[in-house]
Amino acid sequence: MSAGTIIFTGANSSLAIPAVKHFLTNYPDHYAILTIRDPDTPSPHTDKLRAVIAPFQDRVSIRAADLSNLASVRSLTSAITAEIKAGSLPPLTSIICNAYYWNLNVAAELTVDGFEKTFQVNHLAHAILVQQLLESFGRAQDDSHTYCGRIVLFGSDTIFPGQSPLEKYPPLLPEDLQQLAKPTPETDGDHAGHGFQRYSLAKLAIVTWMYALNDHLQKPENSHLRKITTVAINPGNLTDSRALQTNTPFMIRNMSRFLIGPLRPLFSLMDPTMRTAASAGTDVVTLALDQRFEGVKGYFTLLKEDMGPPDSLDKTKQDALWKKTVEWSST
Ligand SMILES: NC(=O)c1ccc[n+]([C@@H]2O[C@H](COP(=O)([O-])OP(=O)(O)OC[C@H]3O[C@@H](n4cnc5c(N)ncnc54)[C@H](OP(=O)(O)O)[C@@H]3O)[C@@H](O)[C@H]2O)c1
């Protein structure tokens, strides 16, 4: 019997593939549910993941979860809940919300659920996934009434205004939070600028929600959940990730291919957050499962405790985003 199950979304991502390898090699008593947007369509990334997990077939299962379709997310959470209840899957020890989406080449897109796609994939779908699985965590060893485990969400340095050279419009939570989920259409055709802001805002939303979730888990009426903690990690700038090659303008793709990639050793000497996806993947698994991090919560830059940007620390904004997320989740 495994010690527990982890869920890893976007399991064929640049960071996830080496992270899954590290996990399967170093946590032999654990089981992994690896979710992929579309496991049935041929993809070199999914092939790479399948090669990595081949020696560990008895401890992994690949599942479909398209985060731009909430029915797909709900179908996954219902299946996992039922399997854990039936005892055919060990209870959860960690949920790693790694998948992400951006598109810097087009105007804002709406999902089948009617939400802005970047926002839904990065924030709303992960919030729903987590909320629906809280009672599928395992019980604390010293208290059989209490669930325990760790949730890992993903931030980015782009949520701090003025941090990224690609930022044109600052990532600040709008007064009207509905603008995150259903933004007013852009009229100036600046797809790269607005697309990058949509990504940063969606990441800011999930980080702000992380603080609200940690508060929620400590409320007296949720005392059975108080040993579940949530962190958000900025994994660093991953110089060998396919992220800058996906849905980005030609200029960014070239910059990534001919400048950032080849000069990574030099960049990482100057800035330790410039690193490989494999090194980030190891840290993510460590943060999710290592006993050294038991009970930690809050924002992390790599494996160092840090603070999110001012908007994410604003309690009024945390509460407002929490309420809106509940509202969006129930549509
Ligand atoms: N790369 C960086 O420099 C960097 C910097 C800061 C933070 N991060 C964060 O680190 C995490 C991992 O990044 P990465 O570089 O490994 O990303 P990546 O290699 O670009 O992969 C993105 C992943 O998200 C999945 N995805 C996209 N749309 C989806 C959808 N609708 N439903 C489900 N999955 C979907 C992709 O699957 P398909 O390919 O099948 O669509 C893929 O597995 C992300 O949360 C990212 O925001 C990355």
Image (tube, rainbow, N blue to C red):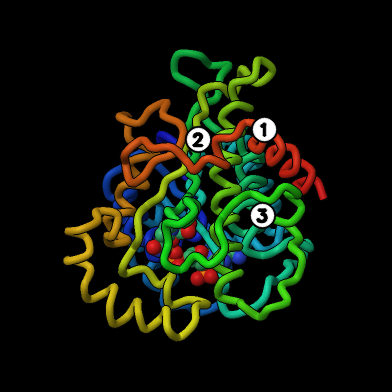
Across and down, in percent, residue 178 comes to: 76, 52
Above or below — where is 252 with respect to 308?
A: below
| Image quarter hosting the N terminus | top left
Q: Which mark is residue 73?
A: 3
Q: Nearer the viewer, residue 103 or 63?
A: 103
Which circle's residue, 3 or 2, is located before the other in the chain? 3
Q: Which mark is residue 18?
A: none
Across and down, in percent, residue 31 comes to: 43, 45
Give the distance between the C-alpha atoms of the residues marked 1 and 2, in whole angstroms.
19 Å
Q: Nearer the viewer, residue 187 or 136?
A: 187
Position of 297 with respect to 215 (left or right) is: left
Q: Amino acid at mark 2?
A: Thr
Labels 1 & 3 near each other (Cβ < 8 A): no
Disc 1 marks which residue?
Answer: 316
Across and down, in percent, residue 61 comes to: 49, 55
Circle nearer the viewer, 3 or 2 = 2
Q: Amino acid at mark 3?
A: Val
Q: Badge 2, how many Cα within 10 Å: few under 14, some, many 20+?
A: many
At 32% from the left edge and 41% from the top edge, which residue is drawn?
Answer: 303
Which circle's residue, 1 or 3, is located before the other in the chain? 3
Disc 2 marks which residue?
Answer: 230
Instruction: Report the residue that reaches farthest toward the right.
Output: 331
At 32% from the left edge and 38% from the top edge, which residue is drawn?
Answer: 304
Give the distance between the C-alpha atoms of the residues marked 1 and 3, in whole angstroms.
29 Å
Secondary structure under the numbered disc 3 in the rendered image? helix
Labels 3 & 2 near each other (Cβ < 8 A): no
Does residue 289 appear in the picture of this structure?
yes
Q: Badge 1, how many Cα within 10 Å: few under 14, some, many 20+?
A: few
Kindly indicate the quadrant of the structure image that contains residue 241: bottom left
